[in-house]
Image (cartoon, rainbow, N blue to C red):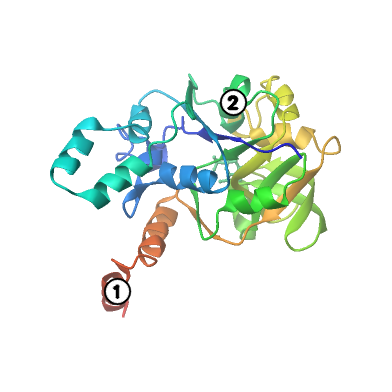
Amino acid sequence: MQKVRKAIFPVGGLGTRFLPATKALPKEMLPIVDKPLIQYAVEEAAEAGIEEFIFVTGRNKSAIEDHFDHSFELEATLTAKNKQQALDTVQHMVRHPGSVIYVRQQEPAGLGHAVWCARHIAQSEPVAVLLADDLILGKSCLGEMLSAYTSGNMVAVMDVPENETQSYGIVAPGKDDGRIVEVTGLVEKPAPAQAPSNLAVVGRYIIEPGVFAHLDRQDRGAGGEIQLTDSLARQIGVVPFRGFRFSGERFDCGSKIGFLQANIAFALQRADLQQRLRGWLDERTT
Ligand code: G1P
């Protein structure tokens, strides 16, 4: 099996669901407790053994580049004040020189288009794709997928309520051992009546190089956008395609309710916050 060394992070979206917060701030920089969404995705990928981090950015996204770089003034101040823990936190996230690559998506034309913008960097290797909006509490979802990956394409999947299929890529399932599901069909955002199941794609993918040849066609799909789902679907029957049921809990941080739930769930895991937060929640909700 060819090792998966590279991961693509599409971060060019406009974040219109979070206006006005995202007018000048990239949506991927919104914090869950004290860490931006994009950092969770990068840490998940690093934990899974990814070595090259490819960000597909857009205009107004320079805060993401700064976030993963040194901040000399901040580091000098923390050193002078002997704030070692804070210094470790900010230095730890600066990645190995040359391992972070930025490419611009000039227009937000869909997830497939964003991934296609990274084609020259992905080259002829299987690559991971992580959507920072989908935040997973628990084990590294990509790490679990890579342990089960052999070849072809793989997507993380979970059951969603039947009336929510129009928000996801939906799988037509074949052979299913409870953890790995054969994907026999894939449709982007079908209405419940047209959906082949309620098994939805969550934003973690391992895609093999052949997907880029389909993305090259630049065909528009659901919502008039170039969909990654459509290019993956074209490879069904050509290369293996599997869905992976991950063990963690997924939060849709692209929605306000999911974002709020994630903040609470992640804070409840934190030794420095859980007791006070739980007490306060109990007071508010009883
Ligand atoms: C994207 C994909 C969709 C997938 C979803 C997971 O949609 O196109 O297939 O199910 O991510 O979050 P988006 O949420 O960007 O509209």
What residue is shown at x 79% (from left), y 34% (from top)? 235
Using residue 133 as the reference point, say whether residue 85 is left or right of it: left
Local crowd size for mark 2, using a 10 Å CA cut-off: few (<14), some (14–19), many (≥20) = many
> Do callouts 1 and 2 mark residues in contact (Cβ within 8 Å)?
no
Amino acid residing under circle 2: His
* Residue bearing the label numbered 1: 275
Q: What secondary structure is marked by label 2?
A: helix
Q: What is the total number of numbered labels drawn onto the structure image? A: 2
On the rendered structure, is 61 left or right of 102? left
In the image, the residue with mark 1 has its CB under 8 Å from the nearest atom of ligand 1: no
Residue projecting furthest to the left? 81
Q: Nearer the viewer, mark 1 or mark 2?
A: 1
Dot 1 falls on a residue whose secondary structure is: helix
Q: x%, y% of residue 189?
A: 64, 43
Please tell me which residue lies in front, 105 or 19. 105
What residue sits 60% from the left and 51% below the top?
Answer: 143
Query: Is residue 225 or residue 154 the one in the foreground?
Result: 154
Q: Is residue 195 visible?
A: no
The amino acid type found where label 1 is placed reads Gln
Q: Quadrant of ligand 1?
A: top right
- The image position of residue 132, as x and y in percent, is 48, 43
Which residue is located at x 44 percent, y 49 percent?
255
Q: Can you identify the residue that label 2 sits on?
A: 113
Across and down, in percent, residue 27 comes to 39, 39
Give whichever of discs 1 and 2 has the lower sequence position: 2
On the rendered image, what quadrant is the C terminus found in?
bottom left
Q: Residue at x 72, y 31 (%)?
A: 231
Q: Which mark is residue 38?
A: none
Q: Can residue 240 be seen from the camera position used here?
A: yes
